[in-house]
């Protein structure tokens, strides 16, 4: 399946086209404010003037650190307007993580929300911090901005995500990725200007910023932005705003269910046409419970920051997906499933999934060797195992990458282990994902104390919290005399994972 032919453009041009189609239509709704498409374009132009007054221009890099608010979309489109590179920063990061992102990306400035200004101030050099609220201020004395030639292959976004080595990966996406990718997503789900998209995902990640918000805006629909996710707020917004499209991670849907089941509440969500779940495996139990309470079918969706969209439920294909399938090939996708020797798997045979989607990264920033190792020809190595049946349905069967996915957020065990082993009473530690009813899996630490020393779980949790974001900090610590060693001489984490899985099975039999 291919994406319909379209002229090569940059991201700002996609917004201008949406404005031309309906200048008076609502573009963004946030905390009682409604911004029309015409007004949004004016606000983007004002924000772009601010960027240039700060010395930013084509090829310049800047970052924004904030909970969800319209100004993050102003940064997105204003960067496109002047040919700059935008780095969205997760608002839950610690000072050391913010400092790393800022330094590594080469950002010249960081715009931040007042709620995180103190953290930002402690992470950045003097004079490099600006209030994100100033991007709305009119600049009457500034001359009109001249046109800027922005090519489809110019760098546009740097997105940070956890890797398997403990160091966050910096993924570079060009303008083509952010014009072709949203167009393919809109085609996949049949999104039109009549749709209303609710965004409660963090705009600091590509799933919220592009897959949800930018797709809604590029198609000319209404995008409702919530500052952060809360199950009550989301459920009420579904009804009040007549939402038709929503993207979430499995944890969000579990929390909605728990909120309603504990209070015996009911919300009419039958107007939601597309309800997408991605970022972590969606359990059959959650899908059944959600359908029974709300009358809406949750759709699986598979992609990654490096390459999107990959697998989903095409709006034009009425065939139901078989149980366990993550979806069918998205528009514009090239895909192979290969054996360890690189040969193609037969139908139904498990292998590593290689893809090239409509939006595929240009490179990992400052990591040419990692970039080269991540591609086979022009196909990206997902690190995930899967199979394809004769009807074009794809199934994800496992992960090669050593990543814990907690409620859709990637956690590098190596990063957590490094934080814990820095405690003076810790000799060795292994962190693995343990099953969790709400989050899917959570980090669990197996700890070997130093000889003659003792340490408590509370002390280790407090120690880890000094350098790690809260979602990365293990809440469970199992103290061991030693850790299992595999044939290669490395810690055998599979043994530890089986122990946790067996605990769940035994608990269910009691």
Image: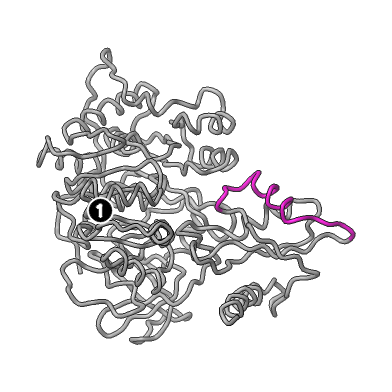
For residue 65: magenta? no
For residue 460: magenta? yes
Q: Position of residue 279 (x, y in %)?
A: 41, 61
Q: Is residue 437 above or below residue 78?
A: below
Q: Is residue 57 above or below residue 394?
A: above
Closest to the observer: 15 or 262? 262
Whether residue 157 is visible: yes
Closest to the observer: 53 or 394? 394
Q: Which quadrant does the C terminus fall into?
A: bottom right
Q: Is residue 133 left or right of residue 246?
A: right
Q: Secondary structure at mark 1?
A: helix
Quadrant in the rendering for residue 226:
top left
Q: Is residue 20 left or right of residue 502?
A: left
Looking at the image, which residue is at 25% across and 69% down? Answer: 313
The residue furthest front is 264
Looking at the image, which residue is at 25% across and 82% down? Answer: 391
The residue furthest right is 452
All told, the count of numbered labels is 1
Looking at the image, which residue is at 37% across and 82% down? Answer: 344
Q: Is residue 15 above or below residue 216?
A: above
Residue hosting label 1? 182
Q: Which quadrant does the N terminus fall into?
A: bottom left
Q: Position of residue 305 (x, y in %)?
A: 39, 56
Whether residue 306 is visible: no
Q: Which residues are magenta?
A: 452-471
Q: Position of residue 500 (x, y in %)?
A: 62, 73
Q: Position of residue 252 (x, y in %)?
A: 40, 57
Looking at the image, which residue is at 37% across and 55% down? Answer: 361
How many other residues sit within 10 Å of disc 1, few (<14), some (14-19) or many (≥20)?
many
Quadrant in the rendering for residue 144:
top left
Q: Is residue 224 above or below residue 343?
A: above
């Amino acid at each position: 399946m291919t994406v319909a032919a379209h002229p090569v453009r940059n991201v700002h041009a996609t917004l201008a086209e949406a404005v031309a189609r309906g200048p008076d239509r609502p573009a963004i709704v946030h905390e009682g404010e409604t911004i029309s498409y015409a007004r949004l374009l004016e606000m983007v132009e004002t924000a772009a003037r601010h960027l240039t007054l700060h010395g930013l221009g084509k090829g310049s890099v800047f970052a924004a650190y904030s909970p969800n608010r319209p100004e993050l979309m102003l940064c997105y489109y204003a960067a496109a307007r002047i040919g700059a590179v935008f780095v969205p920063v997760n608002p839950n990061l610690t000072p050391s993580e913010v400092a790393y992102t800022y330094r590594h990306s080469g950002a010249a400035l960081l715009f931040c929300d007042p709620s995180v200004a103190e953290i930002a101030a402690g992470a950045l050099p003097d004079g490099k911090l600006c209030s994100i609220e100033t991007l709305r201020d009119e600049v009457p004395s500034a001359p009109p901005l001249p046109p800027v030639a922005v090519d489809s292959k110019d760098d546009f976004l740097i997105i940070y995500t956890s890797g398997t080595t403990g160091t966050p990966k910096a993924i570079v996406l060009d303008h083509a990725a952010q014009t072709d990718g949203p167009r393919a997503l809109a085609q996949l789900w049949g999104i039109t200007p009549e749709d209303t998209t609710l965004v409660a995902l963090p705009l600091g990640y590509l799933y919220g910023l592009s897959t949800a918000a930018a797709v809604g805006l590029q198609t000319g629909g209404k995008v409702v932005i919530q500052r952060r996710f809360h199950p009550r707020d989301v459920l009420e917004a579904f009804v009040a705003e007549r939402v038709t499209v929503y993207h979430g991670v499995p944890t969000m849907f579990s929390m909605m269910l728990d909120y309603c089941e504990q209070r015996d509440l009911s919300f009419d969500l039958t107007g939601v046409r597309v309800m997408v779940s991605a970022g972590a495996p969606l359990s059959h139990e959650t899908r059944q419970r959600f359908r029974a309470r709300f009358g809406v079918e949750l759709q699986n969706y598979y992609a990654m920051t490096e390459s999107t969209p990959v697998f989903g439920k095409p709006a034009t294909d009425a065939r139901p997906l078989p149980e366990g399938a993550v979806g069918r090939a998205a528009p514009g996708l090239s895909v192979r499933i290969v054996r360890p020797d690189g040969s193609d798997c037969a139908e139904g045979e498990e292998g590593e999934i290689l893809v090239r989607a409509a939006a595929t990264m240009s490179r990992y920033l400052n990591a040419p060797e990692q970039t080269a190792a991540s591609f086979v020809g022009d196909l990206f190595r997902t690190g995930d195992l899967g199979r394809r049946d004769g009807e074009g349905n794809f199934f994800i069967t496992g992960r090669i990458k050593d990543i814990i996915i907690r409620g859709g957020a990637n956690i590098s065990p190596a990063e957590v282990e490094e934080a814990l082993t820095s405690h003076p009473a810790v000799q060795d530690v292994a962190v693995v994902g343990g099953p969790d009813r709400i989050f899917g899996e959570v980090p669990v630490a197996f700890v070997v104390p130093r000889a003659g020393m003792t340490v408590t779980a509370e002390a280790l949790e407090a120690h880890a919290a000094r350098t790690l974001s809260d979602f990365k900090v293990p809440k469970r610590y199992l103290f061991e005399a030693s850790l299992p060693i595999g044939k290669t001489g490395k810690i055998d984490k599979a043994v530890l994972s089986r122990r946790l899985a067996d605990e769940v099975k035994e608990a269910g039999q009691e």
